[in-house]
Image: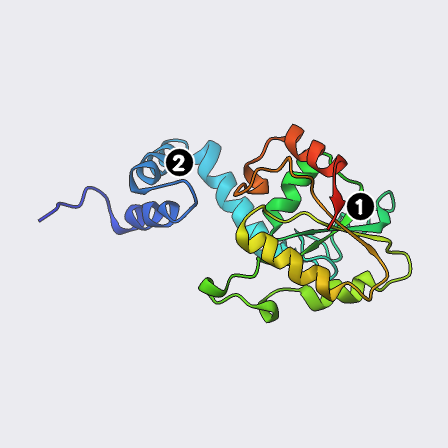
Amino acid sequence: MASTVAGPEIERLIQLLARLPGLGPRSARRAALHLIKKREALMTPLASALQVAIERIQVCHTCGNIDTQNPCTICTDTRRDPAIIVVVADVADLWALERAHATQGRYHVLGATLSPLDGIGPQDLTIDALVTRAQAPEVTEIILALNATVDGQTTAHYVTDLLQDAGVKVTRLAHGVPVGGELDYLDEGTLSAAMRQRTLF
C-alpha cells in the first residue's frame, strides 16, 4: 500500500497540474513543489491571475477568439484589413499566426476540424457564421489556414464548397506547411512563408 507523502490539498494541486498539456504526474509534482516553495512570488500571483481569467475571459461573438473584451481586440482593431478573413481551427492556430505577424486580416475560429471518428460534424463548428461573414460586401478573400492533416483538408474542402456562391476568393496556405503538421508547432518563418505563398483552393 502506497503511503501518502502530502495532504489532500497538495495532492489535489498535483492532480490538477497533471491535467495540463505536457505535464505528467512527475512533472506535475515538480511544478507543485516549485509553486509551494515560491508561494509569495509565484503561487499567489498565479491564483490571482487565474481568478481574473475566470471572471473576465470570454469568447468573441464575431470571430471565436478568446479575450477579455467582446468583440475581441483583433476584431476591433481598425488597422486590420476587413477584406480578408483567415479561417483557423483553433485559437492556438490564431495565436501562432499572430506570433509570426503573418497577416493583417481578421480571423474566424471554427472551433475544431471535421472528424467523423471523433464525432465532430459540421453542426459542431462555426461554419454557418463563416458563410454569413463571407457574404459581407467588404470581404474579398477567405484564407483557409487549416492544419495539413486529413481532417484539416477535409474541412477545407467542405468549407470551400459552401463558399462557392459567396463571391469571394478562397485560398489556402502554401504547401510549405508539412503534410501532417499542425500550425501551433511550426516556427514563425515557416508560417510567414506559407501565408505569403498561399494558392487558390
Q: Secondary structure at mark 1?
A: strand
Q: Residue at x 76, y 57 (%)?
A: 71
Q: Residue at x 13, y 45 (%)?
A: 3
Question: What amino acid is found at the position of numbered circle 2 in the picture?
Answer: Leu
* Residue at mark 2: 35
- Quarter occupied by residue 55: bottom right
Query: Relative to 74, is 34 above or below?
Result: above
189 with respect to 167 (left or right) = left
Q: Residue at x 29, y 37 (%)?
A: 26
Expressed as whole percent of the image width and height from the top left, the position of residue 94 reads 66, 46
Which mark is in front, 1 or 2? 1
Of 76 and 152, the residue lying toward us: 152
* Residue at mark 1: 105
Question: What amino acid is found at the position of numbered circle 1 in the picture?
Answer: Gly
- Quarter occupied by residue 112: bottom right
Tell me if mark 1 has few (under 14), some (14-19) or many (20+) residues whose alpha carbon lies within 10 angstroms of its own.
some
Of 112 and 51, the residue lying toward us: 112
71 with respect to 44 (left or right) = right
